[in-house]
Amino acid sequence: MGGTSLYRMRVVGHLTICAICYTHFNHLIMVKKEILYMCVFLTCMGCKKANQPSASDFCSSIHQTDQSSINSHLSVLDTIMGKSSAAYVLEDGDGSMIARAWLTEHAEKTIDIQYFIFSVDNVGLIACDYIVRAADRGVKVRILVDDIMVEAEADDIMVMDAHPNIDIKIYNPGTNIGKNILQKVSKMATDFRGINQRMHNKTFIADGITLITGGRNIADEYFDYDHEYNFRDRDIFMAGKIVDDANKSFDAFWNHALSVPVKVLIPEEKPIYTDPGRYEKLHQYACDSMNYWPQVRARVAGIPTAFEDIVKSGNLIIIDSIYFISDDPGKNYTTEGLGGSGKTTEALIKLVNQAKHSIDIQSPYLVTTELSRTLFKKAVDRGVKIRILTNSLASTDNLEAFSGYQRDRKVLLETGIRIFEFRPDAACRYHVMTGALQKKLEYTPIFGLHAKSMVIDEQITVIGTFNLDPRSAHLNTECITVVHDKKMANKVLSGFEEEFRQENAWETTKNWNPDHKVNIKKRAGTFVRRIVPKSIL
């Protein structure tokens, strides 16, 4: 289970869908099969181990038994939080995975899940099992996933949706779920703009009072457990008043016409959908420690104390000035062409225009336009120092996006900003990744940047889903969290400073870049992809 599929394109029937037509280039990776039905029957490797004696002991160690609620745990913050909000930056993949699991275990009423990618691998199977267990306790679960990257067969999703407490909707269907090849081709031919407008939001809301959002999707590579390719990413955990805005955003998406119940897309029913034992093998698999990498087994054992650990860390910050900003569902959906704007775009432009002395940015993809370069140039001209960390050709997962950056790299440097390109062997992996996993391997997995963050004037922190590219600006719906707090800004910036160092990134100049660090085949690949219009990158 790993990243062997990371660079494959989607094949629909006998038609290979061209990336130009619809693929979200931030993720020009084929998601590992979202075979939710695999969760039921588990014909995958390791299923034969599901009945080993160790299973019950492992499950008892990782699942909550005291029935305590999220609200009861948050009560320790009541005296200091009041009408404010609490926030905690989830830097490492381990911690971010565990935080989601803890919230799922302690939810009493609702769990709302919104993702661009939800895969089923080691991390994904844990997530599926926890979701079903929560639903079995009576928690109402709503799952909203974008249509483009779903790889599951119809039956696979319908089994999950058939649970009386789980509802699944698909955002902007038309080229995938429930469509035959003729329907897919027709959609691509007649609605080019529509198929390029995707939901890139990533939110996990429990009981309407806690939220995790940021760059991570649900898959091994976002939580440091893939054996071939992992992302350096960043999330933020929040509780309190700020979650109200996330609730409103989720409801807006859930109730929008573009979000279609999977049972409407796939109306037929089969006995397997309601088989009383349909989740048993999922539970058996998830409770069998032998089905997970040792590092995963060791880490999930810490789930019961996850929130306590966050509180004790001293990095849970009580904040008054914090904002969750989300684009409206259907962002520019009916607009002609590929332009437009959105709430997140406008908010980021305003922040850049207000910057006084420094802007530090991490973005996996850096595809600029004349408008964005002018924005940066004006900031530099008024004395603002700008540094951007993006992927190098050696670390990127997206040759199309890199090709767009490559075309304008020199022009962008001429604006006066400094550009650093992330190394695939960055030394910082041992601080933010599952170090034990990496040390056990006989080879070094590629390490790529996926964090979408910004620190302005050492006072304001932005963490979200927004990439510095036209797709995020014009087409995809995004969400960001803006935090006005010097302590958080300094903490995030300290991570930036480490990753700007030469052991973690190359600084590119007008006369030098690290493209030569890769083989000729990959370099040629970026040249070929220059046919792709930058407006959809």
Image (tube, helix red, strand yellow):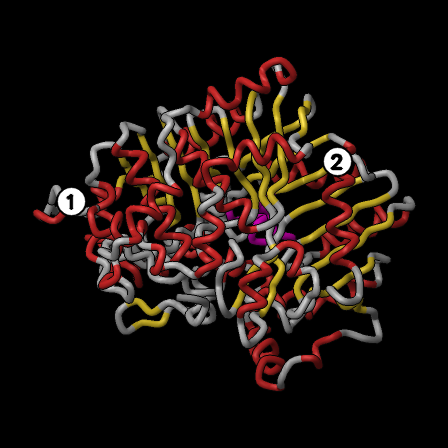
Q: Residue at x 88, y 42 (%)?
A: 357
Quarter holding the N terminus? bottom left
Q: Residue at x 27, y 39 (%)?
A: 261
Q: Which residue is mark 1?
A: 267
Counting residues from the start of the chain, the first of labels 1 and 2 encountered is: 1
Residue 516 among those drawn in magenta: no
Q: Position of residue 73 (x, y in %)?
A: 50, 23
Q: Residues within 10 Å of mark 2 (few under 14, many from 20)?
A: many
Element carrying mark 1: loop
Q: Which of 393 and 487 lies nearest the eye of the viewer?
A: 487
Quarter holding the C terminus? bottom right
Q: Position of residue 77 (x, y in %)?
A: 59, 19
Q: Quadrant of residue 456?
A: top right
Q: Residues within 10 Å of mark 1 (few under 14, many from 20)?
A: few
Residue 278 has which mark?
A: none
Residue 89 as seen in the image, left or right of residue 254: right
Residue 535 visible in the displayed image: no
Amino acid type at circle 1 is Pro
The stretch in magenta equals: 464-476
Q: Quadrant of residue 213?
A: top right
- Proximity of marks 1 and 2: CB atoms separated by less than 8 Å: no
| Location of residue 380 with respect to 111 vertically, above or below | below
Amino acid type at circle 2 is Ile
Residue 403 as seen in the image, left or right of residue 437: right
CA gap between label 1 and label 2 equals 48 Å
Q: Which of 55 and 310 lies nearest the eye of the viewer?
A: 55
Q: Quadrant of residue 168?
A: top left
